[in-house]
């Protein structure tokens, strides 16, 4: 009732005008309150590096240097980091641990103005728990959705006071490292000092340009896409089929792709794609054959040291007649894809027709 004894007028839903006016300041603040509850996405610059776990580091080093002429950018104990293009991008060769099969072991992504503590807090805000490093005895398969900072010492090519490196696993157990744009796998507090680059032992047959993409096999592609888009604030840039989007990273060329088929017990990095200068399918197949690789043929199994072409047809976003996608396997049978520098996972003969979606 009002002071005059009259009942306060009510609006639809039974809320009095007086109470509505009292609520206005709270309603005005609501968008801000909601925004505070949503974790801020981590901006990313580039797909930066990746790791290979191999059965024989010396053999793999000879293989990749002979093929790509990649110099040694840094050494981390038994791990060798090979430069991609003009750097600081690289891929590393590390020995497999006891009972561990060869694998593409991790994805490295650069973050502008990188600070490991700040970015670690952002990961936690997105529901990723701080946990022990798997190297301390915990299996990476058990350490899903966890993050940790490791300190790399001088005996592993790190800084005297330790080179701090931030890693995390996603809901499928796939391992990621976040780093600064100048990270080269070397010394310094953030691993951006590589002062002893070693020239390659061979000129190489193909000239690497940069990283193109990673295709990851997961338990649920929908869950993985949602998780990584929210975490990094990224959108789709192409579709390779009705339910096969690719997540654009940085410049609209690089991307992450998640496909189903893995068990709930853990996902895997199915293959990594590198872009090469002067991409020409016939020439590259000829170079790979001369290098000792053989055609996969009709064998459904991917053996070590084979090459093959997969034609991505219009039903998967390719061109009429097929967008050629070229693959080879290394001495451990790990799959590497090679494409044109403009390849973005889209249409056209070179797969370079993409628009943000």
Image (cartoon, rainbow, N blue to C red):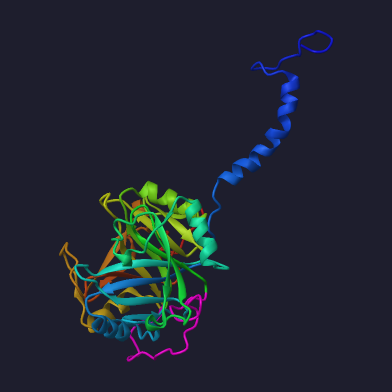
* Residue farthest along the right direction in this orientation: 4
* Residue 150 appears in the figure: yes
Residue pictured at 36% horizontal, 66% vertical: 106
For the image shown, how many numbered marks are present on the structure? 0
Residue pictured at 49% horizontal, 60% vertical: 120
Residue pictured at 60% horizontal, 45% vertical: 35
Residue 184 inside the magenta-drawn segment: yes
Residue pictured at 72% horizontal, 22% vertical: 19
Residue sitting nearer the eye, 136 or 319: 136
Residue 77: quadrant of the picture: bottom left
Residue 291 placed where, x, y %?
A: 24, 83
| 235 on left or right of 327 | right
Residue 169 inside the magenta-drawn segment: no
Residue 131 placed where, x, y %?
A: 39, 58
Residue sitting nearer the eye, 320 or 30: 30
In this view, 338 is above or below 198: above
* Residue 339 appears in the figure: no
In this view, 197 is above or below 265: below
* Residue farthest along the left direction in this orientation: 299
In this view, 241 is above or below 135: above
Residue sitting nearer the eye, 130 or 317: 130
Q: Which quadrant would the N terminus be assigned to in this image? A: top right
Residue 129 placed where, x, y %?
A: 42, 54
| 196 on left or right of 105 | right
In this view, 318 is above or below 52: above
Predominant secondary structure, magenta span: loop
Residue 294: quadrant of the picture: bottom left
| 74 on left or right of 33 | left
Residue 280 placed where, x, y %?
A: 36, 75
Magenta stretch, residue numbers: 182-208
């Amino acid at each position: 009732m009002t002071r005059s004894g009259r009942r306060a007028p009510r609006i639809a839903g039974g809320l009095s005008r007086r109470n509505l006016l009292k609520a206005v300041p709270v309603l005005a603040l609501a968008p801000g309150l909601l925004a505070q509850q949503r974790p801020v996405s981590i901006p990313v610059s580039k797909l930066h590096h990746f790791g290979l776990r191999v059965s024989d580091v010396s053999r793999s080093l000879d293989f990749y240097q002979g093929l790509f002429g990649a110099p040694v950018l840094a050494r981390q104990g038994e791990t060798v980091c090979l430069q991609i293009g003009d750097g600081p991008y690289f891929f590393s060769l590390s020995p497999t641990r006891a009972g561990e099969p060869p694998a593409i072991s991790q994805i490295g992504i650069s973050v502008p103005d990188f600070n490991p503590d700040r970015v670690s807090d952002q990961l936690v805000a997105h529901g990723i728990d701080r946990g022990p490093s798997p190297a301390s005895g915990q299996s990476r398969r058990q350490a899903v959705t966890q993050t940790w900072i490791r300190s790399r010492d001088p005996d592993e090519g790190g800084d005297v006071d330790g080179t701090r490196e931030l890693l995390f696993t996603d809901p499928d157990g796939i391992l990621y490292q976040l780093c600064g744009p100048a990270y080269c796998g070397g010394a310094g507090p953030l691993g951006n000092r590589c002062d002893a680059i070693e020239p390659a032992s061979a000129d190489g047959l193909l000239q690497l340009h940069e990283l193109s993409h990673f295709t990851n096999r997961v338990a649920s592609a929908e869950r993985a896409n949602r998780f990584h888009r929210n975490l990094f604030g990224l959108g789709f840039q192409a579709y390779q089929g009705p339910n096969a989007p690719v997540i654009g990273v940085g410049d609209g060329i690089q991307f992450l792709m998640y496909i189903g088929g893995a068990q709930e017990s853990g996902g895997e990095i199915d293959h990594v794609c590198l872009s090469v200068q002067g991409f020409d399918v016939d020439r590259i197949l000829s170079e790979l054959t001369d290098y000792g690789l053989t055609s996969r043929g009709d064998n459904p199994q991917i053996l070590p040291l084979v090459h093959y072409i997969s034609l991505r047809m219009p039903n998967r976003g390719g061109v009429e007649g097929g967008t050629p996608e070229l693959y080879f396997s290394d001495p451990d049978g790990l799959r590497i894809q090679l494409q044109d520098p403009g390849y973005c996972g889209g249409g056209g003969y070179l797969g370079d027709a993409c628009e943000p979606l």
